[in-house]
Image (cartoon, rainbow, N blue to C red):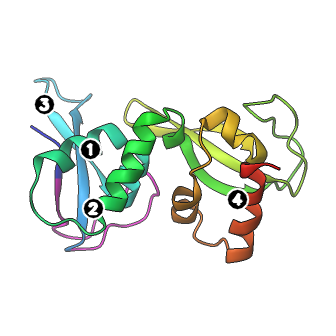
Amino acid sequence: MAHVIEHAASGRAKCRACGGKIAAAELRFGERVPNPYADDGGETTHWFHLACGAFSRPESFLEVLASISKPVPDRDRLEREARLGVTHRRLPRVRAAERAPTGRATCRACKELIPRDAWRLALDYYEDGRFSPSGFIHARCAAVYLETTDLAERVKHFSPALGASDLTELEAEWSGP
């Protein structure tokens, strides 16, 4: 079976990327993958909010987007973000932006410690149908590690508690001098 974009039937499903509930009747993205627990080689569906699917599983999302003709809210924006994720292979790993609560984490890009209260980006790897935490990078190292500074939409989506001033500070850090 192919990946799908459909309305949620009941509102019981959780998004694989952000962990939030997908409301009943909300459009959602379903990525069909082999079921590791099936003896007959069946499939299972991993559900995502549309934006979470575009940000986190861009190849699959673009595949289904190209195959459907029904209207999808913010289709152009979601397609653009998914294409960015395909072009910059590390970009789908970005999961959140935050200030470091301690000074113990090491940046995956420059290998230096991330000082307490410095801006950092949390990363996840997608393996075996799961997102696993994989460390952090300094916000200033984003351009080198991710090979792009086009992060604003992704960071706003996965870090909704950030204010406008926080986003301005972050953009200044990852854009550099």
176 or 47: which is nearer to us? 176
Q: What residue type is labelled 3?
A: Gly
Magenta run includes residue 14: yes
Report x, y in % for residue 97: 67, 56
* Residue lying at 27% horizontally and 61% vertically, measured from the top left: 75
Front: mark 1 or 3: 1
Q: Do the residues labelled 4 and 2 touch (CB within 8 Å)?
A: no
Q: Do the residues labelled 1 and 4 touch (CB within 8 Å)?
A: no
On-image quarter of the N terminus: top left
Mark 2 surroundings: few (<14), some (14-19) or many (≥20) residues within 10 A: some
> Which span of residues is magenta-colored?
5-24
Q: Check disc 1 and report the residue beneath it.
A: 62
Q: Check disc 3 and report the residue beneath it.
A: 42
Q: Distance between the residues labelled 2 and 1?
A: 10 Å
Front: mark 3 or 4: 4
Q: Check disc 2 and report the residue beneath it.
A: 75
Front: mark 1 or 4: 4
Q: Check disc 4 and report the residue beneath it.
A: 171
Report x, y in % for residue 91: 53, 41
Q: Earlier in the sequence, mark 2 or mark 1?
A: 1
For label 3, the SS is loop
* Residue lying at 87% horizontally and 51% vertically, measured from the top left: 102
